[in-house]
Image (spheres, rainbow, N blue to C red):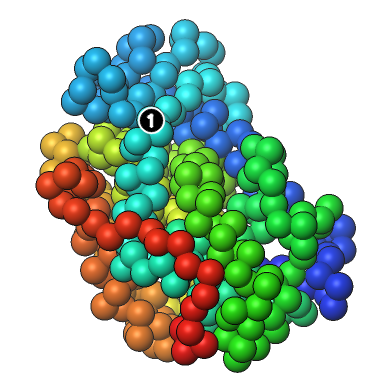
Amino acid sequence: MGGDFIGRWRAGCGRRTAQQAKPAQYGAKVLACGSWLLSCVIVAGMATQPALAESAAPAPIRVADNEKQPAAVVQMPETQKSSPEAKDLPVPQLVLSGDLAKKIGQTIWLNETGGRSEAITSWSANEEFASLGIGHFIWFPVGKWLPYEESFPALLEFMRRKNVRLPAWLNQTQIPANPWRSRAEFRRNANSPQMRELRRFLFDTVAEQTQFMVARAQGAMEKILKTTPDGKEREHIVLQFTRVIRASEDFYPLIDYINFKGEGTNPNEAAMNRETGRRQGWGLKQVLLRMNGVTGDPKAVRAEFADAAQFVLQQRVRNLPSNRVFEVGWLRRVATYRHPIADPQSSPKPALRKSAQVTAAQ
């Protein structure tokens, strides 16, 4: 799935009221200022933790081994007066090369579907919404409310801001609801003109879909810090986030997990623990809170992040037993966080193949 997200009510025409539009509007704002805040958090982590601060410098911090053409760079600004609020921190920017972004997108696509081209448009039998694109961005049918944030409309808005031409039936002032009301209807229309056009559009915009996931990862810490009171918990999250950033040359664990299970800031994205009576989430925030290490060894940090993600997901399965059907796949996915993304030359992966037609059985 393309993450777990806050839902919204869809009226028959696919429009929302002003009140209901707020989550999507907020999500758009987060994407717009994403790179600003991710890097701000990194600065905060350096200021909070002396061990990490020793490596901070006004010049760009390279998070890749290649000194001539770094794949990923965190550009640091001149020192400014800091503030407890994320919005008042300096304004560095995370930069990912195009090749690295493509590599991340391909890996996430493999995580979601095993690289099957026909799964570019899918609707799982265990879900109540369609999953589209390389990140399986979710799209609710008309009149459906679900306790998740709908990511496909946000993707289309992101593309529109990048001047990508959308299919005419999607290019409306308000991105429309999923026109197929059920999985059965979705499958019956697998080869309809709209569905074929949708698949062609998704195959043609793989790079833009990847950049959307990167932008969302860059904006994650704004959401997380807004829901975290100042104090030890806030400092803990900043420290652990900074450790993961420094330990992953490609930022893949963060980008994938946020696309996979969200930021962990939405109270609707939580389930009741029957033993404690407390609601427990399963997003990035909960994973970072689970981490407790201090070492900067990349291999150890990546392993700790994978272990924390596994714990949080298994906790979700305990709280929501119906999710057990997903457990094996979830754990296999987070296990990939233990290693950097493999060089495609040494580990060939299936490429996306365009196909306008699929079988109704999918």
Q: Is residue 23 visible?
A: no
- The number of numbered discs placed on residues in the rendered structure image is 1
Could you say where residue 269 lies in the image, as x and y percent from the top left? 54, 68
Residue located 52% across and 11% down the image: 80
Residue located 47% across and 34% down the image: 38
In front: 109, or 26?
109
In front: 215, or 37?
215
Relative horizontal placement of residue 145, taking residue 290 as reference (left or right) = right
Residue located 38% across and 24% down the image: 74
Could you say where residue 142 lies in the image, as x and y percent from the top left? 75, 77
Q: Is residue 253 above or below residue 266?
A: above
Q: Is residue 262 above or below residue 59?
A: below
In front: 40, or 125?
125
Query: What is the crowding at mark 1: few (fewer than 14 residues within 10 Å), some, or many (at least 20)?
Result: some
Q: Is residue 157 visible?
A: yes
Could you say where residue 252 lies in the image, as x and y percent from the top left? 32, 46
Q: Is residue 308 above or below residue 298?
A: below
Relative horizontal placement of residue 2, taking residue 298 as reference (left or right) = right
Secondary structure at numbered mark 1: loop
The disc labelled 1 sits on which kind of residue? Answer: Ser
Quadrant hosting residue 138: bottom right
Residue under label 1, please give it: 97
Residue located 59% across and 57% down the image: 201
